[in-house]
Image (cartoon, helix red, strand yellow):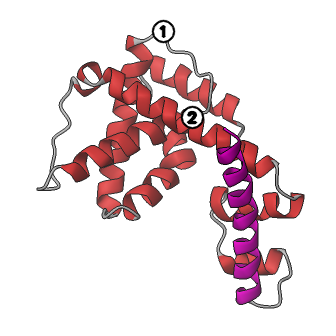
Amino acid sequence: MDRKTTNTLAIDDFKRNSNVAFAILYQQYFTYTKKFVLNNKGNLEDAKDIFQDSLVILYEKLFTDDFKAHTCLGYYISGISKNLWLKKLRNKQFFIEIPENYYATHQEEINLAIENERDYWDKLNVYINSISTHCKNLIQDIFMKNKSIEEIQSKYQYTSKHNAQNQKHKCVEQIRKIKNNDYFQH
């Protein structure tokens, strides 16, 4: 399912107060939140809670703004999730209750987090589209499709996992070089 179809189905479903949108968004985008939370001192339960809170905030945003999905809903959810998790990490007890009016009171902060997330992904897409086709496919398989190194080794017919890891590293380095050149030019 492409992004536009996912966005349209989810938004239409939310407006009908049906739960199908939650299932679609969970299936499509939970992985991003899970990775972020697990890589930042959280566990699977934390990731699930943060993702659910993000969906509630997105739901509120759909009805309080003149919402138009100009980009992938995953960017909105990722931005909201990162904002919520980082806020939770700043709290020393690692416990924060998300009040019902969270979106209304933190609207500017959430919108900025969403915008930053969209900018990040837009820049990353430019960098990825600037590398070799082989590396572009490899990076998408590893990071977007979450394929294991064993699956990568098999698909690209590398002789060992070590060779697959080396190729992954070389492709990431291509992106890093393009990013650094972009940084120094601005």
Compared with 122, 108 (above or below) is above
* Residue at numbered disc 1: 66
Q: Residue at x 73, y 81 (%)?
A: 166
Distance between the Cα atoms at labels 2 and 1? 18 Å
* Residue at numbered disc 2: 118
Q: Secondary structure at mark 1?
A: loop
* Residues in magenta, as a range: 161-186
Compared with 150, 98 (above or below) is above
Compared with 173, 85 (above or below) is above
Confirm whether residue 28 shows in the render: yes
Q: Nearer the viewer, residue 23 or 64?
A: 64
Q: Residues within 10 Å of mark 1 (few under 14, many from 20)?
A: few
Is residue 173 a member of the stretch shown in magenta?
yes
Indicate the position of residue 33 as horizontal and vertical percent values.
44, 51
Is residue 63 a member of the stretch shown in magenta?
no
Q: Nearer the viewer, residue 134 or 14?
A: 134
Seen from this angle, which residue lies furthest left?
Answer: 93
Indicate the position of residue 119 as horizontal and vertical percent values.
58, 35
Q: Residue at x 54, y 40 (%)?
A: 24
Kind of residue at disc 1? Asp
Q: Main secondary structure of the magenta part?
A: helix
